[in-house]
Amino acid sequence: MKVTGYRSLVTTHDWGRPVGDVNGIVQSGVTEVPILLLETDSGLTGVGLGQHTDIARVFPAVEGKDPRSVTAIYDAMLSQVFKSGHAGATFGAIAAVDMALWDLKAKMAGEPLWRTLGAADSFVPGYASGLCYGLSDSEFSSHYQSWADRGFSSAKIKGGSDLGRDIERLLTAREIMAANSPRPAMMLDVNESWNAKQAIRHLHEIEEKLDLTWIEEPVRRWDAEGLARVSASGRAAVASGENLTGLDQYAPLFAAGALDVVQAGSVWGITHFMRVAMAALSRNLPVSPVGFDANPIAHAAAALPNMIGIEVQDFGWPTGLNVDQRIENGGIMLGEAPGLGIEVDESALAAPADGWGVTGGPHRRARQAGLQLAVLNRKQS
C-alpha cells in the first residue's frame, strides 16, 4: 500500500454553550474542525484531525510511502522542513498526517489503534473540563453536574483574571465532584495569563482554601525558570506543555525541573505525544494529554504506563463525524472499530462558523496578560 494523495475538508463542532478561556470566548459555541483525508492506492483512507494549512510543504515526504512506516515518515516530515522550522502551522500539518497514518496502520491490521499500540484495556481515565470560562455561575454548576452524572471525580476549570471567582468555582466544582469521591482532584488552568510572582501569590491564596492538584500554564510556556519557581513555591503540581512542538522545546523545561505534570497537545499528533510521554517516563513524571475533538490521542494514552488522565471537554462530536467511543464512568471507553474509530460522512459536514479565523481570532491574548502583580479592574483589549 502507498499514500497517493490527500483531501482537506472542514466541519464544525457545536458545543451548545460558550467555550473559551481567559484569552477569549467563542460565544456562539461553534468552532471549526479541519479534517485531513489521506488516500492510498488500496482504497483505504486515513483520517486526521486538526489544522493543516501547511500540508503541501510536508506532503512530499509522505507521497508514495507505505503508511505502516509511520514513525519513519514522521521523522522524514521533520527533516523535510528543518531549514525553516517545524513549529506552528507546519507542526499542525505534520500532526494531521501522523494521525491519518496511524489510522491507516491500524485499519490495515483490522483493529482499533489502541490495540495496535499495545494497550490491554480500551478504557482511558479522564478528568472533566469544558472550556468553561464564559459560563454563568448557574451554567457552570449545571455543566459540571453533567460530568459528575457520568462518573467523573476530578475537574479542571478555566480562570486567570479574577482570583475570587476562580476560588469560588473550584469550591463549587469540588462539592459537585464529591458525589463520586471523598477527595476530588481539582485543577486550575490560567492559560499563561500570570507572571511568576503573581502565580506564587495567587497559588498561596488558593491553597489556603482547598487542596489544588495542579496549576496549569501559570506562566508562559517557554519560561522554564518561572515554571520551576512556581512549582517550588507551593504544594500543587505545575502542569504545562500543550503548546510545545517537539522534544527540543521540552528540553529546557526538563533541565530546569519546571514540570510536575507533562502535558502534550492532542493537536500535535500521536507520535509526538508518545515521544513526550517516554521522555517524561524517563524522569519519573506523569503525562496528561489535553482535550481535542473526538479524542484521537486517547488511543495512545491507553497504551502508556505514566498517563494519569486525559482531558475530556464534551460529550458530543463534530458534525458529520461518527466516533466509536463512549464518555462514561469517569473516562473514555474506546470502541472496536478499526483505526481511530472516526468515520467521516461528507454529506453531513457543516460549513465553518461565521467569523471563525478573523484577525485576532477567538483566543487573542489580553494586552497586559502576565504583566501585573494584582488583577486590576480595567478594560481588556
Image (spheres, helix red, strand yellow):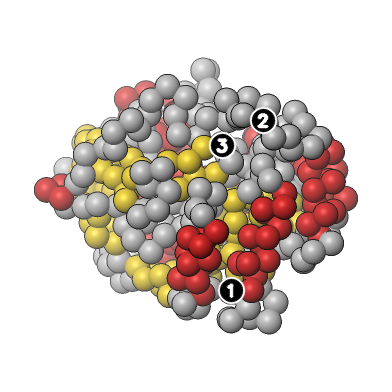
Q: Is residue 216 above or below residue 144?
A: above
| Residue 176 tag number | 1
Identify residue for label 3: 23
- Secondary structure under the numbered disc 2 in the rendered image: loop
The image position of residue 219, as x and y in percent, is 72, 38
The quarter holding residue 113 reads bottom left
- Secondary structure under the numbered disc 1 in the rendered image: helix
Earlier-in-chain disc, 2 versus 3: 3
Q: Mark 2 belongs to which amino acid?
A: Arg
Q: Residue furthest right?
A: 233
Residue 43 seen from this side: no
Q: Mark 3 belongs to which amino acid?
A: Asn
Q: Nearer the viewer, mark 2 or mark 3?
A: 2
Q: Residue at the spot x=68%, y=46% of the render?
A: 162
Earlier-in-chain disc, 1 versus 3: 3
236 left or right of 109? Answer: right
- Secondary structure under the numbered disc 3 in the rendered image: loop
Residue sitting nearer the eye, 58 or 291 = 291
Identify residue for label 2: 378
Q: Quadrant of the C terminus?
A: top right
How far, Cα to Cα, is label 2 from label 1?
32 Å
Q: Residue at the spot x=59%, y=51% of the render?
A: 158
Q: Residue furthest top?
A: 84
Q: Mark 1 belongs to which amino acid?
A: Ile
- Near mark 3 (Cα within 10 A), the count class, few <14, some 14-19 or many ≥20, is many
The quarter holding residue 183 reads bottom right
Q: Nearer the viewer, mark 2 or mark 1?
A: 2
The quarter holding residue 342 reads bottom left
195 left or right of 368? Answer: right
| Residue 66 tag number | none
Earlier-in-chain disc, 2 versus 1: 1
- Near mark 2 (Cα within 10 A), the count class, few <14, some 14-19 or many ≥20, is few
